[in-house]
Amino acid sequence: MNQALRPAIGKPVERVDGRLKVTGGARYAAEFKVANVAHGVLVMSTIANGSIRSIDTKAALSAPGVIEVLTHQNAPRVRFPQRPQTMDDYVAPVFGRSLPVLQDNTIYFNGQPIAVVVAETLEQAEHAATLVRVVYDERPPATRLESEIARAFPPQEGLMKESPTDRPADVVRGDPQALSKAEVVIDETYTIPIETHNPMELLSTIAQWTDGKLTVHDKTQWVANTQGYLALVFGIPESDVHVISPFVGGAFGSSLRPWAHPVVAAMAARAVRRPVKLVVARNQMFTSHGHRPYTVQRVALGAGRDGRLTAIVHEGTAQTSLYEENTESLVNATRILYASPNCITKYRLVRGNIQTPLYMRGPGESSGVFALDSAIDELAYKLKIDPLEMRVRNHATSDPSNGLPWSSKSLLECYRRGAEIFGWSRRKLEPRSMRDGRYLIGLGMATATYPTLRMPASARARIFNDGTAVVQSSASDMGPGTWTTMKIVGAEALAMDLSRVRSELGDSSLPKGSVHGGSGTTASVGSAVHEACLAVQAKLLALATIDQRSPLNGANAQQVTAENGRFFLKSDSSRGETYAEILRRNNMESIDVTVDSTPGDEEKKFSMHAFGAHFVEVRVDAELGSVRIMRVVSGIGAGRIMNEKTALSQITGGVVGGIGMALLEETVMDHRMGRIVNASLGEYHVPVNADIPALEAFFVEEHDDHVNPIGAKGIGEVSYVGTAAAVANAVFHATGKRIRQLPITLDKLL
Amino acid sequence: MKPFAYTRVTNQQAALQAIVQDNTKFLAGGTNLIDLMKDNVEQPARLVDINRLELTQIVDQNGGLRLGALAKNSDTANHQLVRERYPLITQAILAGASPQLRNAATNGGNLMQRTRCYYFYDVAMPCNKRQPGSGCGALEGFSRIHAIFGASQQCIATHPSDMCVALAALDAVVRVEGPQGARTIPFADFHRLPGDTPQIDTNLKRDELITAIDLPASATRFSAHSYYLKVRDRASYAFALVSVAAGLEISNGTIREARVAMGGVAHKPWRATRAEQALNGQRADEATFHRAAEAAMQGAQGTEHNRFKIELGRRAIVRALTIAANNGRSV
């Protein structure tokens, strides 16, 4: 058997869950009907630092319908181990401990869950939650990064001999003094505020105990992580935790970790001996999961007059919580994106009274590349070199950080085609030189990149005797189309018609999927599905070739190929039989194989990244400062694209997110109280339809045999990365104003 | 949300009887009130649903218009006579909220909207408007969306309505019904400045019901030269950082009468009377508009976060007047 891979971009496939989603048939965590369910509502702290002196639940307990109120005084004791000794949560920071929810009276941040009210109805629980009276011993909060920067420290993870994430270590390449020797230097500081994921679906859990076993319907990007975490926290075997999460209504990273709410829901369900549904309210969402951390970045670039980089210095400082050291790849893209012989990257953390941050789409890279590609743009203007030409001149033909060849890279083609489609050549070099009446026109661009991740994952493929098949993994689908992609991967590997293959996801009883994040689901779970399909096909073929009743009897695997659910001899297509015929003859209802798929040593031989380029045209009102995005063209090279139809949606979705980052998104903290002031979708602005023009995107085909068995690199993050820089660069081109502090609101342009 | 009693009334008399009970509020479109109840900012004991009252008509009134208090914002904005006589009203309404909200929201309710101040909305924060005596969180806090005119040490909140800015510019009159019968309130006197009582938004008495809003016939003279300019952070579904309702009566290039009101700058729709004085009798040209803008912004006081509104307001007034003078078409 030797299946030729389809061409990189196949024909468009409709989302298998599209109809379910628009008709309400797709069930999200809080929508499952569970008999006798009680409703939990969280009570959150209203101070950012200190402790609870007393908490009075009498009024709440006597309110109508209330069953129980749990606080640190009466909640079940559970276990939150110290990492890295015991990893309880695979996405958590390597150093620290999960928020010990309802275990003691310490307040680490404003908006921390301090009690849960359980009642017969949601409305009763919501009302009773307002009746819980708390007296605090309050200390001044520390939430402003700049005020604490003297206490910045290198993350412990970066000091480990072998960091499990390879993120935070200081890295010096080449001459550490190169900057001071450069002919031309740019040295600037860029600030990005806290941004909150704000997915449509709220964090939700329905928890139910049956004979000591726990079942949870939960919104999660990693079913296996939630399962393992709850098992460890409650001290029960993993096999006694069943996590069900077939659909996720957007997450952008916010549900990579289990957080406190499934623990609280399970505690409450145990306490009241009933199933408990806990939905985190929108305003509570801002502190119930992580966020893109507040960062301050210094980027210094040295170059020759020809625009070739001779030195890069990138020092990033990010905020983390009091109890965990959250790290991101803030400065990592800088090590690989441009060919400079000399490069220094440093990463520091500052603690504050905040919830632990967590990856938000394009984590690290989105923030880091905003700073780097803004600085590259600044250098281009200083040298009077076209910003695109500047990037082409510094294109890295191999990985500058380690000298490894790229597994594949089509960045130059993304630049070229993107510029052509976008019409880059009409751009005038000088800022503030293009006008349309009272509007200033600006054209900007930036580079996108994201590493290709492949993680261990398991999958099962099963062929039925009715000529259908199913591929299964516990992985989640938060919206990119994983249900559809896995079906496509399965149908192709099984050589079956697409309509005969279905996928099943999002249930911990299925083979363990990898994290649904880091743009790694297709590469990881897809590879597992691919391998499982090839394995079950081989197993099925073996039943035929050893069987005298089969027309394929005696053939070896190399002589056989398959098409449309039928094996046949390559030399004589009339000699063959269908999968279903083989199963029926053997009185088998189905045949299946489960595989555990792991990456090989490709990482040691190749540097594997997706690359791309974003081109943005803005129109800035010369007097009023308002910025309108007129056009975006994004070109992405990301290996094999499994389904261009859903993949293009993912690219334009990422661009929308990047536009939000550039122009609108900011979680505002009142540092006096350490409390977020705009915790609502009314006042935390994300782009609305009217802000977004028609977005154009294209893929550059890459045949990459090195990254993984299916040749896919992942596209969720790379689409986001670079967008904010491209917008900021376009705004500079329009106005001559360089905005180094996101978001670019109109007051900064007046 | 605190539990509450709900009654529906079908005539005005029943409404007026029901409202006299303690801690009772009228429920019309509910687009703001229900949100505030969910956030425990408003905790009425009783809601009196007035949606069945016959107050939805929009009718001619001696060449002006009477807008029923319960006419929907979207029906009002798209009413043929409103579009013809008061395009400023149409533009202002359509600049606000979203189609879904405008379909639910009523004209009377629009007047009764409460501020969008962050501190007002969060019961864990101090706010004199929500809880008199607790302090103003915004005064030394985050005040980007707050007032630059008419604020007090007790409150620097702004009124969020777009429609009301246009109503203020056109000298609308609010018709109310109370236990002592009907009365009218000139629009300029309807909303209040915060002073020492920021908890009181309007001069409507708590036992009174808004029945209609009258637009005078005299204000139709601005229909040819009016414009509502809204400056905001995104293209839709955001409150105004600064908005300007401009109406000009121009003959032979000279401004006979001008109306200018601003939104997003004060505790009430802010009538820029100094700007109007600077416009009346002058040539409708850019120099005049700049002088009017300067005059309008006199006395504005910004905070660290909202100081930009002073310059933005100046520019927005010039822009709005320029477009208004150009028959309401963008230039």
Image (cartoon, coloured by chain):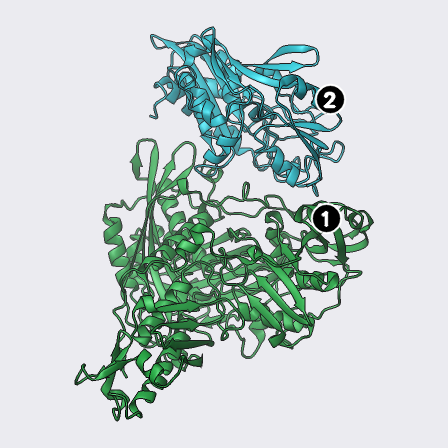
Chain colours: A green, B cyan
Give me the residue at 53% from left, 67% from top: A222
Mark 2 falls on what kind of element? Answer: loop
Please, which chain is the residue tagged with disc 1 on?
Answer: A
Q: Where does label 2 land, which residue?
A: B20
Please, which chain is the residue tagged with disc 2 on?
Answer: B
Quadrant into which the N terminus of chain B falls: top right
Residue A127, placed above or below residue A166: above
Q: Where does label 1 land, which residue?
A: A129
Give me the residue at 43% from left, 36% from top: A625
Q: Nearer the viewer, mark 1 or mark 2?
A: 2
Q: Residue B57, which numbered label?
A: none
Q: Nearer the viewer, residue A485 or A16?
A: A16
Side of A722 relative to A42 (left or right) = left
Mark 1 falls on what kind of element? Answer: helix
Q: Residues within 10 Å of mark 2 (few under 14, many from 20)?
A: some
Q: Amino acid at mark 2?
A: Val
Q: Nearer the viewer, residue A85 or A127?
A: A127
Residue B94 in percent (x, y) is at 44, 28
Residue A137 in percent (x, y) is at 80, 52
In the picture, residue A624 is in which quadrant? top left
Q: Nearer the viewer, residue A57 or A633?
A: A57
Residue A174 visible at all: no
Give me the residue at 37% from left, 81% from top: A536
Residue A189, placed above or below residue B331: below
Alpha carbons under labels 1 and 2: distance apart = 30 Å
Q: Nearer the viewer, residue A170 or A342?
A: A170
In the picture, residue A266 is in which quadrant? bottom right
In the picture, residue A636 is in which quadrant? bottom left
Q: Are marks 1 and 2 on the same chain?
A: no
